[in-house]
Image (spheres, rainbow, N blue to C red):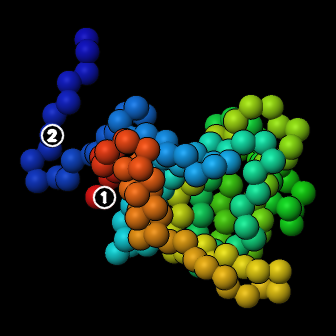
Amino acid sequence: MPATAVAVPGAPSALHRAEEEIPFVDFGDMQVQLLQVDVEGGLWVVRTRMQPGTTVQRHKHTGEVFAVTFSGAWKYLEYPEVNRAGSYLFEPAGSIHTLHVPDDVEGITDVWFAIRGANLNLDAEGNVESHVDASTVRDAYLAVAEQQGLGRPPVIGL
């Protein structure tokens, strides 16, 4: 017997987006799919596809990060562990690291991240050069989507 969806009166409804509804936008060595954004709550949920050799600037997180790896491999240059398909990673607020996809990884590294707060991008001396948060990710994603002719994707929270 097929399942039937029944809304519960007074309860909030679940929100669903199929993979093809929200496009990946191209940021060079990385493609980003912004799945959800909550600027007031400081939450941004992205799926990233990274090429071998991609390195994300050393940064400090002001909030927690949750990550699930779907394919490929990546690590933090400051730690020995390698995240591979099926890996789950939790990062506490205050963690500092440099994300890197090793050059010898075959194919795309595909990772889902839920990030609270901001990434404070650090220079070699540990000074903050710039930051990335829910509003900057939202604005960059929408601008690049428009530039790439993808319109305004139905990101949850917009």
Task: Name the residue tied to disc 2.
Answer: 7
Q: Is residue 147 left or right of residue 30?
A: left
**Which residue is drawn at the image coordinates 9% and 47% (left, top)?**
9
Q: Name the spot of residue 57 as percent of width and height, x first.
A: 73, 67
- At label 1, counting other C-alpha atoms closer than 10 Å, the crowd grade (few under 14, some 14-19, many 20 or more) is few
- At label 2, counting other C-alpha atoms closer than 10 Å, the crowd grade (few under 14, some 14-19, many 20 or more) is few
Residue 75 to residue 77: above or below: above
Distance between the alpha carbons at the discs numbered 2 and 1:
21 Å
Residue 56 to residue 105: above or below: below
Q: Earlier in the sequence, mark 2 or mark 1?
A: 2
**Which residue is drawn at the image coordinates 63% and 49% (left, top)?**
28
Q: Name the spot of residue 98 as percent of width and height, x first.
A: 77, 65
Q: Describe the element under mark 1 as helix, strand or loop.
A: loop
Task: Name the residue tied to disc 1.
Answer: 157
Nearer the observer, 126 or 45: 126
Residue 69 visible from this viewpoint? no
Label 2 amino acid? Ala
Residue 141 visible from this viewpoint? yes
Quadrant the N terminus occupies: top left
